[in-house]
Amino acid sequence: MEPTPSALFAALANESRLRCLMLLSAQGELCVCELTQALGLSQPHVSRHLAQLREAGLVSDRREGIWVHYRIHRDLPDWVLAVLSQTVIGLVDQAPYRQDAAALAQMARRAGAPLCGPYPGAEPPSLSTPQDAADARGP
């Protein structure tokens, strides 16, 4: 589905959706939990806006076990890519977009891998005690 001009500009007019698009444009692909952490917003809030971006045809998703990863849709027309590119160029050094990128870069356990998974064996560890949680976080 090709986004309409009104769908694109409606997406850009909402701060949460714009912040998601800015991070996805810079990072390529992010898990919902990475976006939630970087933006400092609740998971339901982020997921709702990502669903709206997907319905508008601006992003696509990929499921991996319990994780959902989003990226800018690969088949966007040139005019949409040009608008997104100029938006990123114009806003990348402004608040809150600069802080979002910094928060993402500072996330623990994010050396090129998503914060939330996948864990070896495909399932996250069971954290039944505070010590289990501490052990899972590492030093």
Image (cartoon, rainbow, N blue to C red):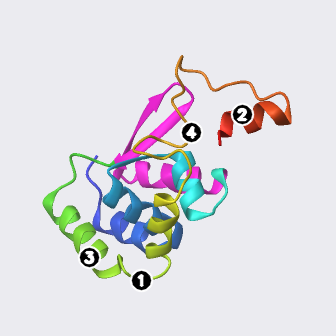
Q: Position of residue 10 (x, y in %)?
A: 42, 70
User: Which quadrant of the figure has residue 90?
Assistant: bottom left
The residue closer to the viewer here, 96 or 130, is 130
Task: Kindly indicate whether the residue at mark 2 contacts the one at mark 4 (C-beta within 8 angstroms).
Answer: no
Q: Is residue 51 magenta?
A: yes
At mark 4, the secondary structure is loop
Looking at the picture, tell me which residue is in the foreground, 101 or 46.
Answer: 101
Amino acid found under the numbered disc labelled 1: Gln
- The mark closer to the camera, 1 or 2, is 2
Q: Mark 3 points at which residue?
A: 89
Q: Which region is colored magenta?
A: 44-71
In the foreground, 61 or 101: 101
Alpha carbons under labels 4 and 3: distance apart: 29 Å
- Vertical placement of 5 versus 46: above or below? below
Look at the picture and state if 127 lies above or below 50: above
> Which of the two discs, 4 and 1, labels the residue nearer the N terminus?
1
Residue under circle 4? Answer: 116
Q: Could you say which disc has been placed on residue 131 in the image?
A: none
Q: Nearer the N terminus, badge 4 or badge 3?
A: 3
Element under disc 1: loop
**Mark closest to the chain's N terminus, 4 or 2:** 4
Mark 1 touching mark 3, by CB under 8 A? no
Mark 1 vs 3, N-terminal side: 3
Crowding at mark 3 (Cα within 10 Å: few <14, some 14-19, many 20+): few
Q: How far apart are marks 4 and 2 (CA)?
A: 15 Å
Residue 45 among magenta residues: yes
